[in-house]
Amino acid sequence: MWLSDAQKIGVALTTFGTLFMFLGVMLFFDAALLALGNMLFLSGLTLIIGPQKTFYFFARKQKLRGTACFIGGILLVFMKYAFIGMIVEIFGFLNLFGDFFPVVVTFLRQLPFVGNLLSLPYIRPQIVDRIAGSRTSAV
């Protein structure tokens, strides 16, 4: 898979955005780091998939509740209500990107060390199969 230069920059911005959000949470919901992480994440996502596809992704009728919560959470973080904003933002993120979790779990199951870890008896039936949407129960 070949990425254009803008998409490579978008991957870097999204990665740094995720890192800044993680650091913001680890440093007791530092509003400045969370706001910077949000801006980097959104700009990186826009560079990866393009402005028009980003708009159509967030404006779909079935994603409006997730979009409203995600943007509302970002606005709350900007207004220095970092803890409440992150809770609302996480709810919106799960509503927006929840469809991708089975794809991510399937990819992680194919990795050498992580796949073995996800197949452990106590992890697989209770957590991983539920996320992946498996209907079969592990024996």
Image: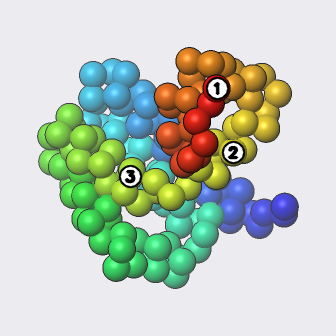
**What type is the residue that disc 1 sits on?**
Val
The image shows residue 51 at horizontal and vertical percentages of 52, 76
Check disc 2 and give the amino acid type: Thr
In the image, what residue occupies the spot 27% across and 29% down? 29
Identified by mark 3, the residue type is: Phe
Q: Secondary structure at mark 3?
A: helix
Answer left or right for 113 relative to 52. Answer: right
Q: Nearer the viewer, mark 2 or mark 1?
A: 1
Q: Which residue is mark 1?
A: 139
- Which numbered disc flags the more N-terminal residue, 2 or 1? 2
Q: Report, in whole angstroms, how far the alpha carbon at label 3 lies from the one at label 1.
A: 33 Å
Residue name at image x 58 percent, y 74 percent: 50
Query: Disc 3 to disc 2, how far (Cα)?
Result: 20 Å
Q: Is residue 32 left or right of residue 12?
A: left
| Mark closer to the chain start, 3 or 2 | 3
For mark 2, does the 10 Å Cα neighbourhood hold few (<14), some (14 to 19), or many (20 or more) residues? few
What quarter of the picture does the N terminus occupy? bottom right
- x, y percentage for residue 128? 56, 34
Q: Are marks 2 and 1 in contact (CB under 8 Å)?
A: no
Residue 85 location, quadrant: top left
Residue in front for this viewpoint, 70 or 102: 102
The relative height of residue 133 versus residue 96 in the rendered view (above or below) is above
Which residue corresponds to mark 2?
A: 106
Numbered mark located on residue 93 in the image: 3
Q: How busy is the neighbourhood of tag 3: few (under 14 within 10 Å), some, or many (20 plus)?
A: some
Q: Marks 2/1: CA distance?
A: 19 Å
Are dots 3 and 2 in contact, CB under 8 Å?
Answer: no
The residue at 51%/42% (across/down) is 131
Residue 138 screen position, x and y as percent: 62, 30
Q: Residue drawn 60% across and 69% down?
A: 49
Residue at disc 1, secondary structure: loop
